[in-house]
Image (cartoon, rainbow, N blue to C red):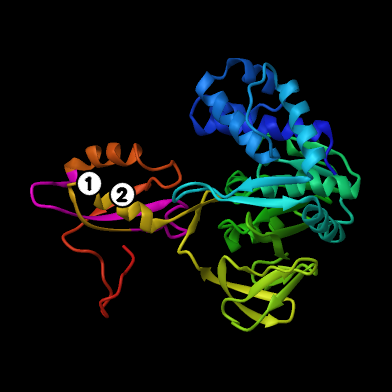
């Protein structure tokens, strides 16, 4: 399933995403093919972190390498030996959780996806292959379909009319599709697109069809499980892939397992089951929300806010669709502080929160917003 060139691309994506995460070189994610140069000019501490993440991904003890090629050779040897990859959750609340995916699991997934995408003739990748979603759709699936992969920068303003062709599967993510729609970009005939359930609004799915997408596939899954289900219209239930078995002892929080494995797994969401192979999402079990495709926890942001001496009480929640797709915060201040102290609060948060956790807007009031029944209300 995995060639040496695939491994090199995965490690290159580790380097590029780590450079962007550290704000070292945000443009690195937009420059496929420049990874060897990035390897040589990365600060040592950032490169050390990237080397550790690559070692964790492929399952070997971290060691230093003098070039990207040597690193890829060693990682490929580890893959041949271990036949497994360890992907990590986003880790917004503490350490990222390791999730092992064996070759059998990865093959089972790609075989199931191949039946869904059997008419695809080329995969166009806009997502990093070092994360499970990108790996599944831009490495595992193309191998099963025996089709080529083209890696492009996630920029909606490119000349898509000439870059795309009939039979392409364009693998993107919700925030990219939101920008695509806002830029009024159209698809050439015969192009399919795929996105994740990471807060891809129903109106975005509809707009992608209006822009000429031959078919939109929205994928439901998690790093812990891999792909679970899919749908093509936002108003439809998700259809569960046939390699999953579902236990309905608790119909609101069912468990699932791969048919070839003994252990059951909890779904990351509350769901309803309108049919034997259908599910409808009702809400996260861990109170997480998706911000630009990353899982974040408003309660954690509230806890950090409350640790500042200016903050007496607060609420944090996801913006409404008409407001944006980031977090917003409502703050009740302690005596002696005014909204003019927002600057010091923002500086305090910037040192403790990731860019996805950082609220985009702040509202101040004398008490938290409540409904007529005394429950939390929007603002």
The picture places residue 235, in percent across and down from the top left corner, at: 64, 71
Residue under circle 2? 304
The picture places residue 15, in percent across and down from the top left corner, at: 62, 29
The picture places residue 195, in percent across and down from the top left corner, at: 67, 54
| Residue 308: mark in rendering | 1
In this rendering, is residue 44 above or below 362? above
Q: Outermost residue toward the left?
A: 336
Mark 1, Cα crowd under 10 Å, few <14 / some 14-19 / many 20+, is few
Residue nearest the observer in this picture, 154 or 24: 24
Q: Which element carries disc 2, helix, strand or loop?
A: helix
Mark 2, Cα crowd under 10 Å, few <14 / some 14-19 / many 20+, is some
Whether residue 163 is visible, yes or no, is: no
Q: Is residue 318 magenta?
A: yes
In this rendering, is residue 305 above or below 347? below
* Residue at x 82%, y 49% (from the top left corner): 141
Which quarter of the figure has residue 257? bottom right
* Residue at x 59%, y 61% (from the top left corner): 203
Q: Are marks 2 and 1 in contact (CB under 8 Å)?
A: yes
Q: Outermost residue toward the right?
A: 146
Which quarter of the figure has residue 225? bottom right
Where are the magenta residues, as a range?
A: 316-339
The Cα–Cα distance between marks 2 and 1, rounded to whole angstroms, is: 7 Å
User: Dividing the image into 4 quarters, which one contains the C terminus?
Assistant: bottom left
Q: Is residue 173 left or right of residue 292?
A: right
Q: Is residue 366 magenta?
A: no
User: Dividing the image into 4 quarters, which one contains the N terminus?
Assistant: top right
Which quarter of the figure has residue 157? top right
Residue nearest the observer in this picture, 287 or 186: 287
């Amino acid at each position: 399933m995995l060639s040496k060139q695939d491994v090199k691309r995965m490690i290159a994506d580790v380097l590029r995403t780590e450079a962007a995460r550290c704000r070292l070189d945000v443009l690195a994610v937009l420059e496929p093919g420049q990874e060897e140069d990035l390897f040589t000019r990365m600060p040592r501490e950032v490169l050390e972190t990237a080397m550790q993440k690559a070692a964790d991904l492929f399952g070997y003890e971290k060691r230093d390498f003098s070039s990207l090629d040597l690193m890829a050779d060693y990682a490929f040897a580890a893959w041949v030996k271990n036949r497994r990859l360890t992907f990590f959750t986003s880790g917004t609340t503490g350490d990222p959780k390791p999730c092992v995916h064996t070759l059998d699991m990865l093959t089972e997934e790609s075989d199931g996806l191949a039946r869904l995408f059997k008419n695809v003739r080329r995969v166009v990748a806009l997502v990093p292959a070092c994360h499970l979603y990108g790996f599944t759709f831009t490495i595992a699936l193309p191998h099963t379909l025996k089709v080529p992969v083209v890696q492009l920068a996630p920029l909606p303003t490119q000349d898509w009319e000439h870059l795309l062709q009939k039979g392409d599967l364009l693998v993107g993510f919700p925030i990219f599709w939101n920008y695509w729609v806002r830029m009024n970009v159209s698809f050439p005939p015969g192009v399919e697109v795929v996105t994740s359930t990471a807060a891809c609004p129903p109106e975005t799915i509809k707009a992608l069809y209006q822009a000429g997408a031959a078919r939109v596939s929205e994928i439901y899954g998690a790093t812990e499980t891999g792909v679970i289900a899919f749908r093509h219209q936002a108003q439809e239930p998700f259809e569960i892939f046939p390699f999953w078995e579902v236990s309905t002892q608790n119909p609101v929080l069912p468990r699932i397992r791969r048919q070839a494995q003994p252990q059951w797994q909890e779904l990351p969401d509350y769901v309803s089951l309108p049919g034997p192979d259908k599910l409808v999402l009702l809400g996260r079990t861990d109170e997480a929300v998706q911000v630009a495709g990353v899982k974040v926890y408003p309660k954690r942001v509230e806890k950090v806010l409350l640790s500042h001496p200016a903050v007496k009480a607060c609420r944090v929640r996801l913006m409404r669709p008409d407001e944006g797709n980031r977090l917003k915060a409502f703050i009740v201040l302690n005596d002696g502080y005014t909204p003019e102290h927002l600057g010091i609060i923002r500086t305090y948060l910037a040192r403790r929160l990731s860019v996805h956790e950082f609220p985009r807007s702040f509202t101040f009031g004398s008490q938290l917003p409540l409904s007529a029944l005394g429950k939390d209300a929007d603002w």
